[in-house]
Image (cartoon, rainbow, N blue to C red):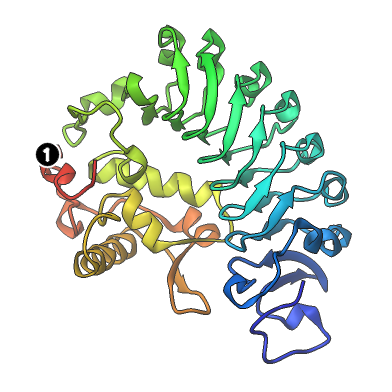
Amino acid sequence: MELYGNDNFTSDCCQWGLVGCTSQKVTHLHLSGLIPSLDLKKVVTSDVLAPLFHLQTLISLDISKNDIHGEILRVGFANISSLEYLDMDGNSFNGSLPPHLFSLWHLATINLDYNLIHGSIPTQIGNLSNLVAMSLYSNKISGAIPPSLFHLKRLGFLNLGRNFLNMELPAETGNLSNIEYLFLDNNNLSGEIPSSIRKMEQLKCLDLGDKFVIWLPEEAKKDKAVKTCSCSSCSCNLRKLYLCVEKMRYKAVSCISRSYRPTVPVSYIAQVLGFSSTSEGNDQVSVGLEECVEWLRAHGACLTSDGNGEMQLDTKASSSSLYIPEPEDAVSHGDASLAVNDFLARTSL
């Protein structure tokens, strides 16, 4: 894989802008949006990734938004056993999820959103005992969630929305004791919502599509700032809204900071927190983005810019610097008395 746009080429790869090293060993590759597919005459297939699997010291790999086609290479991932962060969203990977992917014992975050992956989730998912966040949104995953997934005690974020899951939620769902955000919308769920979800004491948002529920722990219910939201359409899109108030925004950003490496676009966070919406005009989106940047800075977030000048949240630094300011210092919808209906008016449902 060539490093497109790397004008200052040097033989020392640790000096390349898209590469991170520790003790002269490659540990991080940030290759998001690297392949300019519109300028290439032939389709880029997953074989292009083969050289990366020789980097046995790799900890973080981001190959998102490259429109790479073909099946996920099955054997290669077993060679990078130290991998903790894997982002492959926004490509055209097809085929099934290779079991070798779930032999990466250190894996904490995996993002395969917006691909063409089909088949079921392998039972080997239960091997990932360090998994904190997994998102397979908008694929063609079918069947049922394997029971082994519900034993992942550290899992805090799970998004399997917009797939073809056909199942009833088992009582074991409540075993996800640290889950904060669970999205199973736009699937073929049936049956009753298991009462065991009340064991999920950390749960902030649960989206089951036509069985939409928000449940909050008792401590949050007692807080004057906490409002639950309701809507006439049971399929409302809560990807733009985790919760509607100051403390819940803070918890959402804290979860993102713990779950993703190394950065997350502020434009995405602005949608998650409800500062902007994809249905708004450019001017409104720009204003919402400015408000989100102001809110993040007021809460101790560490922001940086990528090579294209897009504002990014430095998740590693922010995970230890975030805080909730005193009420008089709160900005941009940080008012504890903010009405949910006012907040929902800014979002697209």
As helix, strand or loop, the secondary structure at mark 1 comes to: helix
Most extreme residue toward the bottom is 8
Point out residue 117 in the picture as x, y percentages from the top left corner. 64, 40
Q: 86 left or right of 55?
A: left
| Residue for badge 1 | 341
The quarter of the picture where the C terminus appears is top left
Point out residue 73 in the picture as x, y percentages from the top left corner. 81, 48
Residue pictured at 41% horizontal, 29% vertical: 185
Q: Quadrant location of residue 33?
A: bottom right
Q: 337 left or right of 94?
A: left
Residue pictured at 89% horizontal, 60% vertical: 54
Between residues 296 and 145, which one lies in front from this camera angle?
145
Point out residue 223 in the picture as x, y percentages from the top left corner. 21, 30
Point out residue 26 in the picture as x, y percentages from the top left corner. 79, 68
Residue count near mark 1 (Cα–Cα under 10 Å), binned few <14, some 14–19, many ≥20: few
Q: 112 left or right of 42?
A: left
Between residues 251 and 281, which one lies in front from this camera angle?
281
Most extreme residue toward the front is 41
Q: Quadrant location of residue 102?
A: top right
Q: Is residue 331 at least partly visible in the picture?
A: yes
Q: From what the image shows, is residue 156 above or below residue 213? A: below
The quarter of the picture where the N terminus appears is bottom right
Q: Is residue 153 at least partly visible in the picture?
A: no
Residue type at the position of mark 1: Asn
Q: From what the image shows, is residue 71 above or below residue 230? A: below
Residue pictured at 67% horizontal, 59% vertical: 68
Between residues 208 and 69, which one lies in front from this camera angle?
69
Q: From what the image shows, is residue 250 above or below residue 182? A: below
